[in-house]
Amino acid sequence: MLTTIVSKAQENLVLNPGFEDVNLDNLLCTIYPLGPEFENAVNYWSYPNWGTSDIYHTSLSPSCITHPLSTNTIVLSSHLPHTGNSMAGFIMSIPDVTYREYLQGTLSASLEIGSVYEVQFYVLKSASTAMSINNFGIKFLDAPMLQNSSELIDIVPDVNYSGTPVTESENWQLLSFEFTPTENNLNRFVLGNFFTNENSQISYLFIPGVMTNNYAYYFIDDVSVRFLRHTDSADFEQIGPFCEGEDFELPTTSVNGISGSWSPAINTTQTTTYTFTPDEVIYLPVQMTVEITPKTIPVFDSFMPLCFNDQNFVLPTISLNGISGNWSPSFDSEKTTTYIFTPFEGQCATQQSVEVVVWDDFDFNFMYFCESGQLYLEVVDNPSFISNASIFEWKVNGTKINENNRMLNLSSFINTSNHQLAVEVTVTNENGCHKKKNIEIAADNFCMIPKGISPNGDGLNDFLSLEHFNVENLAIYNRYGEIVYEKRDYTNEWNGQSKNGKRLPTATYYYHITTKKGERFTGWIYLLQEVN
């Protein structure tokens, strides 16, 4: 298809464009006086008025006026045709008169409305004429014309050279135009000067002995009318806009069936103007600008660091600038994590990453100790650090206590409970994170070391109870100063046994207690063993 179109675009529609198709026997040796002589000499050309154009041919004798290199005393031509053996010549203008000569040609096919044609011909001024002129024009017709006079043909040409006068008499000058028909059936044309001298640019140059003719005479050769292209252009539906990075394709065939290719290569990152070049050169290129919308970056408020295992925090599913999506991975309330927000489809937005900081967990333990006969409960690290900026809130048996340091004197609450103290403490660390713990404490024998024990299983004084003392080490001695029992981190494990687990005899024993607070307690304790 491409080859066919190119061939059509190169085809010259002018029949006998270089005046080479002649009847040799009918060629005249002199200028042509009448229309029939001219039409009998050259095929497909005629006169449109009574002006008499001429045919020059190299087959004639050089003594003929109509030989291109004539030696006749009446010399109009001293130059060979542009191509081939033949050329035409005519008078374009004579001072003070409206006499005109024209050439009327024939096309092999009618011109098509909506098509663009290239119209060309070569001109050369006769070296023997002093007058130069512009206004070389062509008028296309749907039938042969004949004006019954040799006057100027008063019609507006379809194409016309209106530049400076053509003065070149040595080298052929190409005149070239584009013409788009607006009428049907145009298959003839008239070539010549359609303007009066007053409406033409004219120049004179007299050279005595050379320029003997005071008029404008020009030679014409190689007239062509070629199909160039259609005025129709490829029609496309506008595509886009597209989101940045979104793939798209440019159609290679237009809505009206014109195929071709696009340049430059598709760019999915920015708005670009693309040029469509049809495969068939008869169609004009077209352009399309494809808009690329930059991706919106989802915006979120900064997330404050979270306390460990904060169950109230939720990652927002809609950004501040209205982008909806979801997060991955799932929210982890126990460690600092970077989360990726992925917008839902249909939104031109990028992914966004956000780090949610989770403070490390902290923990604490309780420690009892007795001091000056008073029982204290202290919050101690385990092992995470509780800073001096931490805040402590205490409750005893459900009642809030006006105490905010890490130690609480429990002795003052002995009379508030019959048997147990329910203690609750909430610690708020320097990051504002809270942790709450509870402990049940027997409300009797605070900071009292028993005077004796009777491990008989009746539930009364069956063992040495020191659980409130926060004992670092307990040592039991017999009356000979020998250690018979010893235990670190003691609470209530001694019920009268020796180091090797044997039952000690009834006797008075000496104890030595060291607390984790560094206090030391010594004294005597009576062990009563029942006889089996």
Image: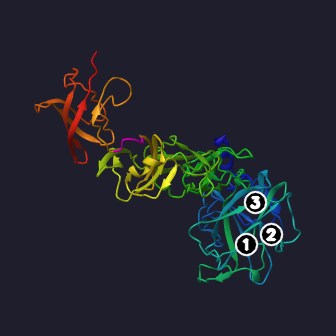
Residue 9: image x %, image y %?
A: 67, 50
Residue 248 lies, with reference to residue 119, above or below; the image says: above
Extent of the magenta region? 442-446
Q: CA distance from mark 2 to mark 3?
A: 29 Å
* Residue at point 21%, 20% (across, down): 502
Residue 267: image x %, image y %?
A: 55, 51
Is residue 495 part of the magenta span, yes or no? no
Image mark for residue 477: none
Q: Main secondary structure of the magenta part?
A: loop
Task: Locate residue 373 relative to residue 201 in the image: left or right.
Answer: left
Label 3 sits on residue: 180
Residue 403: image x %, image y %?
A: 43, 58
Q: Nearer the viewer, mark 1 or mark 3?
A: 3
**Disc 3 secondary structure class:** loop
Q: Are marks 2 and 1 in contact (CB under 8 Å)?
A: yes
State which quarter of the image contains the N terminus. Answer: top right
Q: Residues within 10 Å of mark 2 (few under 14, many from 20)?
A: many
* Residue at point 78%, 79% (across, down): 196
State which quarter of the image contains the C terminus. Answer: top left
Label 1 sits on residue: 91
Q: CA distance from mark 2 to mark 1?
A: 9 Å
Location of residue 51 (image quadrant): bottom right
**Disc 2 secondary structure class:** loop
Lower sequence index among marks 1 and 3: 1
Label 2 sits on residue: 51
- Pick whichever, 30 or 246, lies toward us: 246
Q: Nearer the viewer, mark 2 or mark 3?
A: 3
**Disc 1 secondary structure class:** strand
Q: State the scheme by which the image is colored.
A: rainbow
* Residue at point 41%, 54% (across, down): 429
Q: Are marks 2 and 3 in contact (CB under 8 Å)?
A: no
